[in-house]
Image: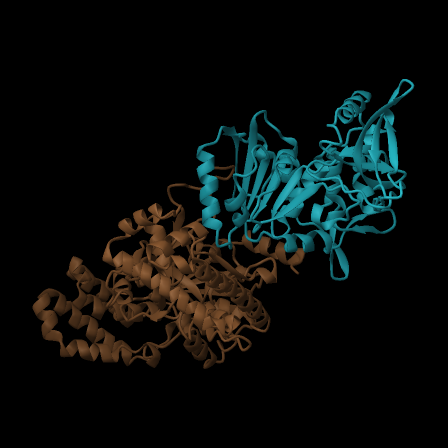
Amino acid sequence: MIDLRTVDHLFELGAGGATRHASIKHGLFRDFSISINRLLNTLGDGAEEELWKRLLAPIKRYRFSLAGAPVPFNSEFLSIATLIEAARGRFSFYERAHLAAAKQLEIVLDLGVALQTCSDNPMRDFIAEQFPKGVTDGAVLLKDSRLIMQAQWCLRQHPATCMWPIVTAGQLKKETCYAHLLILGAARWFPEYVITAPRAPDTCVVRYSWIRDTMPNRRVFDHGPNPGDSNAKSVAIPYDPVEMLDAQDVVPQIDWAAIKQRALTNVEASFDDVPAKIAVIEGDFAVLLEDDEFATILTLELDTDEPTERVRRIPVHRIVPGMFIILRTTGGGDYILPIADKILGKTATYVRSCQREWKAQLRRAVAQSSLLEVSVRLLDAGSIRANEMNVRNWMSPRNIRTDDPKDFAAIMKVIGLERSTDEYWNAMAAIRQAHQRAGQQIRRVLLRQLQAVDLAILERDGRLEISLPDVDAGTLTAFRVIDLAPADQLVSSTKLNHPFPLGDTDAPHAPR
Amino acid sequence: MPARLDKCATLHYWLGPEWCPFPEWAHCFIRLGWSLQLNAVDQQRAVIAVCVPHRGFVASFAALGAVLSEPLPEPTPEDVKRHFTLLLNLPDPLQSPTALTYLHTGRKIHGSFAGTVTRGATQFVKVCVQAKTPYKSGGLTHFVKEADAINLQIEPGIQPALGRHATGSALVPHSEFVNHFYGQDELHLLHVAARCRVGIIGRINALREETTQIRCAVPAKHAMTEGVLNDILRIRKFISDTDIPRVAIYGTRRDTGPSTDDRNATRLVIFDGADSYTKWGHYFPSANMLVVLDRTEAMFQEGLSQVNTRYYQRSGECQWLAATRIPARLDSTGFLELCR
C-alpha cells in the first residue's frame, strides 16, 4: 500500500532542482563516432544500399552501446573485430561502389581497430571519480537492456561503483527513489518522465561530449496558468563548440524493411493471409501480430490495480510500445490449441478433422473461383454476413466457426456438406467451448505463477520466461514491446505470434 | 461553507510515531475539488487537467474538497412541499414500481411506493416496507405525511425488493472526525440532504486503500480526533448499504459506463489517470472535469494530446483557476467547454 509520505516525497522530487549534466571526453571514441557520421554524409542516400547498410548497422549499434553503458571499449560482448576484418577483406567492393566513401570507411575501420584494443571505460571511471567512496542509494539508468549483465559486471569490478545497481526506464515508474540517479547516454533516449517525474533528488545525465542533447520541458500543456513555450518543448543543453552528433542520430533506428523482408521470406500470397503488424520486442526479436479488428493478444500488465487483472486479453490495435505481450516460445505460437485438445479428450481428433475438412473445402472453393464469387454464392445459399473479409476469416485456421448458424449452413451447402451441417456445427461448438476453457485455465495458472515471480526483473530486463507446469502449454514468455511497424502487411496465419530473431541489421531501439 | 475548507488546513496524517500535517499540494487539490464543484457556468463545464509525478491521493483529495463544498441547506417548506408533490405523483405502483428509502427512528428502511391515501384533510404517501406472505401476514406499510416527506427518498434505477423484515438498518452515527467539518445542525442533513454528485473513475483498489486505510486526524481539545477520508467522502463501493453515498467510483477497466442517472447527477467527475480519461472522457455530458495525468503512465501522451485538442475547441477561459493556486511545478491547464 502506498502511503502519503511516499507520494509527498515524489511530489517534492518533482519540484526539485534542475537535472545536472556531465560531459565525458574521450578523443578516440569521439573520432570514431564522428567518422561514422562523416562516412554517412559522404554516402548520402547510398547509405541505404544493402552493401553499406549491412556493414554500417552493427558499427552504429556498437557506437550506441558504448555511448550509453559503463562497459570498456574492448568488451568482448560488443566486439566488432570480425566485422572489421571481413570489411577489410571486401574493401575492393566498397571502393568500386563509392571511392570517396571507401576512403572514409578506412578511417572508421582504423579507429574501430584502435577502439577494440582500448580498455578504457570512461563511464565507469566517471562514476568512480564522482563518488569515490561509493554509494548505497544510487542507481544507473541504462537504455540498452541487453547490456545490463555486462554493465553490472563491470561496475562490480571497481570498489567505488560496485554498489550501483542498474535500472531501466520502466523501473522508474514505481515509487522507489534513490539519492543519486545517473542517466547514461542522453536524456532524449529515455521517456520524458525520467526527467519530469524524477525519482532522485540528484539526477545527472552523463553523456559523451560529442552528443548533442536536449531536456524535455516540464510544461506540456499548450496553454494554462503556467503556459510552456509551445514552440520549444525541450531545453537545449550547453555543449562544446566542436563537431557534434544529435542524440537521436546515435540511436540505431529500426529497419522495418529488413524485418519485413525476413518475416515474409518464402511466403506467397494466399487467400487465407491475414493483415499483420510487426512488433519489435525485447531481446532482439520481432513478432507478427494479427491486426484484425477483433484480433486479441494476451498481455501482462505490471501497473495494475487488481492482481487478478494482471493477465488480460486485449485487442491487438490497442498494443502500444512499453506493454508486455505473452507469446509461446516453445511448441509453436498457439498455446491454446494443445490445452483445448486435452480438454476435448478422445473427441479432439474427430472434431479437429471436421474443422480442417470444411475449411479446406471452403479454401478449395475460393481457389477455384474467387473470394467475391464464393461470397455471392454464400449469400445466395442463405448467408447473412458473407463478404470477402468474412470468408477470408472463416477460412482461417485461427477462426473456429461462424457466429451465425445461417452463415455456417450456407457454407456447408456451398461446399457440398449440407447433410452434415448439424454434426459439424456441434463439433465446432465443442471446439469453441474447449478453447474458452483452455484460455481460462492458462490465465489462472499464469496468475498463480506470476505470484512467485519478481516482476521487477521483468520490468528491468523486458523479458521473462514463464513455464506452466500444470498445463501442457510449453513455455510462455512475456516480452516488452519496443515498437510497432507503421504499416500492416498480409501474412500467412501460420506465421503469427512466432517470435523470430532480428539480424544484425535491425536494432531494436525505437526513438523513445 | 468556506469554514469547512478552512478546517481542512488542520488535517494531519499518521507518520510513524506522530501526526504530520497534510502537505501543501494536498491542500491545493482539496481547493481545486472545492472550486470545481462550486463553480458552475450556465451551459458550460470546466475542464481542469493537472500533470503530476504520481497520481496517488490526488483524486481522493480533490473529491474531499468537492464533497465538503456541497451545501447542506435545511429544506424550506417550499422544498418539502415540492418533494411531497413529487412523491404523490409517482407512477402507479402496479404498473411501474418505484424503490424508496425511508429514514425512520434512526434506521434506513428500503421500501416500495404503494400509492397515496387521504385521511380527513391530510394526504399520505404509502410506503410498503415488508413483503407479503401467503398467509396474509407481512406487507407492513408506513403512511408518510408531508412534514415527514423529506425522510423519504426515491432510489432511481433500482427495482424495489422487499424483504421479510421491515426493520431496516441502523444509520451509522457520524464520527467526531466528521463532526469537525460539519456543525451539529448539519449532521442530520447529511442523511437526508446529501447527494452523490462527485464521480471518480480510476483504480478502485488504490483509492480504497487511500480513503479507508490511511489514518487521518484533526486536532481536538485534548488529543487528535482520528478518522479516514472515507468518513467524509462516503464512496459508494466503500460504505455499507445504510450510508448515503456522496462519491461514486467506477473502475477504469469496466466495459459499460455509469448509468444515465449517475451521469446526469454527477457535477464533478475526476479522472484518476490518463487511462481513465482517454476511455471515459467523453462520457459525461455536463459534469465539470478534473483530469489527473500521471507523467509515468503509458497513456500519458495520449491523455495530454486529448486535453490539448479539447482546449482548442473550448468555449471560454476558466477565470477562477488561478485562485486555486496550483503550484507552478505541477503543469496545469483549464478551460470551459459547452455541455453536450
Which residue lies at the image location 54% right of the left edge and 39% below the top edge? B283
Instruction: Please give the letter of the chain rendered in brown.
Output: A
Residue drawn at x 77%, y 42% as measured from the top left: B161
Q: Quadrant of residue A64?
A: bottom left
Q: Residue furthest right?
A: B120
Residue ranking furthest to the top: B121
Q: Quadrant of the N terminus of chain A?
A: bottom right
Q: Residue furthest front?
A: A419
Q: Position of residue A434 (x, y in %)?
A: 51, 66
Residue A20 screen position, x and y as percent: 46, 59
Q: Is residue A208 visible?
A: no
Total marks shown come to 0
Q: Which residue is rendered at x = 58% and y = 51% of the image? A: B55
On the picture, is B164 further left or further right than A64?
Answer: right
Q: Is A316 or A192 nearer to us in this picture?
A: A316
Q: Is residue A41 left or right of residue A136?
A: left
Q: Which chain is tinted cyan? A: B
Relative depth, front residue between A442 and A395:
A395
> Whole-percent x and y of residue A172?
51, 62
Is residue A263 something one can see in this rendering?
A: yes
Q: What colour scheme does the image use?
A: by chain
**Residue A452 drawn above or below residue B280:** below
Q: Residue furthest left?
A: A96
Q: Is residue A464 left or right of residue A243?
A: right
Looking at the rendering, in which quadrant would you find the C terminus of chain A? bottom left
A354 w.r.t. B309: above or below: below
Residue B202 lies, in percent from the top left, at 60, 49
